[in-house]
Amino acid sequence: MPFYITTPIYYVNDVPHIGHAYTTIACDILSRFQKLNNQDVFFLSGTDEHGQKVEKAALNSSTTSKKFVDQMSENFKKLIPFLGCEINDFIRTTEKRHIEGVQFFWQKLKKNNQIYLSNYEGWYSIRDEAFYVESDLIKDGNDYKTSSGSTVEWVKEKSYFFKLSKWQDKLIEYYENNPELISPKSRYNEVLSFIKGGLKDLSISRTTFSWGVPVPEDKEHVMYVWIDALCNYITALGYPNKENSSFNRYWPGVHIVGKDILRFHAVYWPAFLMAAELDPPKKIFAHGWWTNEGNKISKSLGNVIDPYSIIKEYGLDQIRYFLFREIPFGNDGDFSKNAISKRVNADLSNNYGNLVQRISTFIIKNCNGRINQTLNFNKVDNKLIKLFEEKFKNYHEQMSIQQIDKALRSIFDLLSETNVYVDSQAPWTLIKTDKERMKVVLFLICNIIIKSTIMLLPVITESSTKVLKIFNYNFDCISFNNFNKLLDHDIEISNPKPIFPRINL
Ligand code: ME8
């Protein structure tokens, strides 16, 4: 089955930070999970390069807008492999394929009588690239600000409008019939009540600057950056080419976005798509925001977390794991170095790493690195096998609904119980008293280690790969098909090495 997953396309007005890395890694985890389910995955990321915010940043640089966006986009592209993420395509909104696709989309809306020309007069925030009504704003002396502190300016210009108001009832009906389309539930409720509060037609073109996609047949206007940006999800698939195209195969997709941009994705985007007679997205998941040691992350506070330096300091898998285990995916979270160290030491070093290390070195030392396959399990063993089956089921259910933290918790509960089993069965004692029983115990522990490692593969990809190599696991066999079945071959271990050294607190 095709599975299409997207990150937001990131604004190139500044360099990437941990927030961007967070969304990209989330998509990578979910994409790797679906690959283990044998799905045909298409994972897209990219950059949002038009609009006033980017134009302003380009003007402040000493180069042309085109050169500026080329350089800045490269920073986002380069970050992806550094984060251990594997994408299928990277789209830039300044590419020809995108511009042509968006212009086609615009014409389709026009043909369907969804667009009209009028005048816009109201507030606009360049930082948010969003229109605001006065009731959304907070008075700040003589000025107004948004609730997140963005400044706004009064805009008065000729503009094309999209007939968003016409889609209010359709959107309500659509979401009421499909409540699982927006997650978490609280965000779904928020979107639904926003739509029920009434939708106004949306200004979708600008005339007071020129850094945007030209509106077809009206050179005076460029498109509003959000209609341009949202279309990336389909232009990257080859839209408007529908026959035999990736569009045909992969659309509709799953969008992972920050809570700040949910409204654009869950209100405007499905309405645009329905108006163009296309399917709305399959799912929109809105995650929360990270603060840094309790403070809002912002350039002016000088506390922006650079993904390169934090990964160099703690390690890639350590950061990937921390980001997705520490807080429920969907909630806000606080990024603190103390929390990273505690989390890594407790889970990755003690619970998982130590288990792998002590079992693999024990087998090398005492069994020549080899444990034969067996089925001679007793009651205690069967209890652990049953627990594994339960935890895998839970892991699978949670990952399927993007609850990455809960899925990880299932694996680590299983590993904790496995450590208890190791201590109670004590293979180091059995070696003296009952060698046959020792082999059964070791075979089962190796099974659980291998299975847990495969479950961890989407999150801590590099380290899981290393562990599977220690256990000489055949990578061609990796899939969640028949996952409950224990290994039907002997286990061979080579070159055990410590995987997660403890971080000194
Ligand atoms: O909004 N914590 O781009 P953008 C968690 N171009 N995530 C964060 C974060 C934080 N502190 N800060 C940013 C745009 N993010 C548009 C999107 S899509 C058609 C167009 C993440 O560069 C989060 O995913 O401002 C947020 O949605 C995204 O970065 C916004 O990136």
Image (cartoon, grey):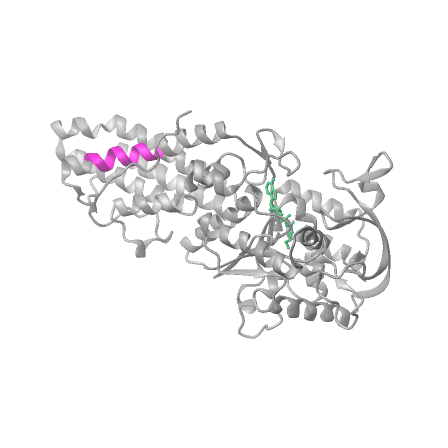
Position of residue 319 measured from the top left corner of the image (x, y, whole percent): 46, 39
179 with respect to 438 (left or right):
right
- Most distant residue in the bottom direction: 243
- Above or below 86: residue 395: above
Name which quarter of the figure residue 464 lies in: top left
Q: Is residue 435 magenta?
A: no
Residue 383 in view = no
Q: Is residue 353 magenta?
A: yes
156 with respect to 450 (left or right):
right
395 with respect to 133 (left or right):
left
Position of residue 141 measured from the top left corner of the image (x, y, whole percent): 85, 34
- Most distant residue in the front direction: 62
- Above or below 483: residue 233: below
Q: Closer to the camera, 217 or 344?
A: 217
- Most distant residue in the top direction: 505
Q: Residue at x 35, y 49 (%)?
A: 483
Q: Residue at x 70, y 59 (%)?
A: 227
- Above or below 143: residue 32: below
Q: Closer to the camera, 326 or 82?
A: 82
Residue 358 in view = yes
Q: How many marks?
A: 0
Q: Residue at x 53, y 49 (%)?
A: 24
Q: Specify the segment rendered in magenta.
A: 351-362
- Above or below 427: residue 17: below
Position of residue 383 measured from the top left corner of the image (x, y, whole percent): 31, 34
Q: Quadrant of the C terminus?
A: top left
What secondary structure is the stretch in magenta mostly built from?
A: helix
